[in-house]
Image (cartoon, rainbow, N blue to C red):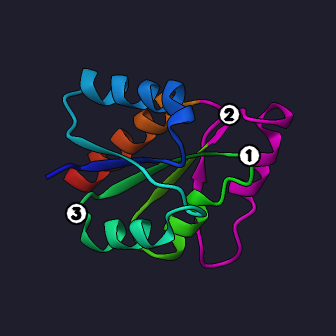
Amino acid sequence: MSLISIIAGSTSDEEIYKKAENVLKENNIKYDLQIISAHRNPEKLDEYLKTCESLIYIAIAGLSAALPGVIASKTDKPVIGVPVNAKLGGLDALLSIVQMPPGVPVACVGIDRGDNAALLAIRILNLLKK
């Protein structure tokens, strides 16, 4: 079973999700990588979330950056959003991720910081082991 799921909205986010993958590989953490857009593939995202056994989600998204919030609205598992510098220096994505409505919590790391998202996920896993 994968402990962490990395979900990226597009293959254009590869540079960012590779950072997360590298940290997880270095720490021997089982993970799953999916490319699923909240806008273009909502049914695929719903199905994945229903069947996924991972304990933590890392959601990587740029532009409107809806993916982390959509995931958080459909699960009670921790979601870590990674804003991507696709336009406006990534500020549009950053603001979209940090401004979630009440009841839809999403943790957020810095722009393009897939590595920090993986490190935060590992810290959460360590708490769950205690």
Task: Report which quarter residue 111 is drawn in.
Answer: top right
Residue at the far front in the pictured view: 40
| Amino acid at dot 2 | Ile
* Label annotation for residue 13: none
Q: Earlier in the sequence, mark 3 or mark 1?
A: 3
Residue 70 or 103: which is nearer the viewer? 70
Q: Earlier in the sequence, mark 3 or mark 2?
A: 3
Alpha-carbon distance for marks 3 and 2? 27 Å
Q: Residue 94 got which mark?
A: 1
C-alpha separation, residue under disc 3 versus residue under disc 1: 27 Å
SS at mark 1? helix
Amino acid of disc 3: Glu
Report the magenta residues as a range.
Answer: 83-112
Q: Position of residue 68 (x, y in %)?
A: 56, 58
**Which residue is pictured at 50% across the width and 69% down the height?**
42
Write the residue at 54% across / 49% down: 9
Please name whichever residue, 93 or 126, is drawn nearer the observer in this view of the structure.
Answer: 93
Q: Is there any visible trace of residue 130 in the rendered image? A: no
* Residue 119, image x, y percentages: 42, 33
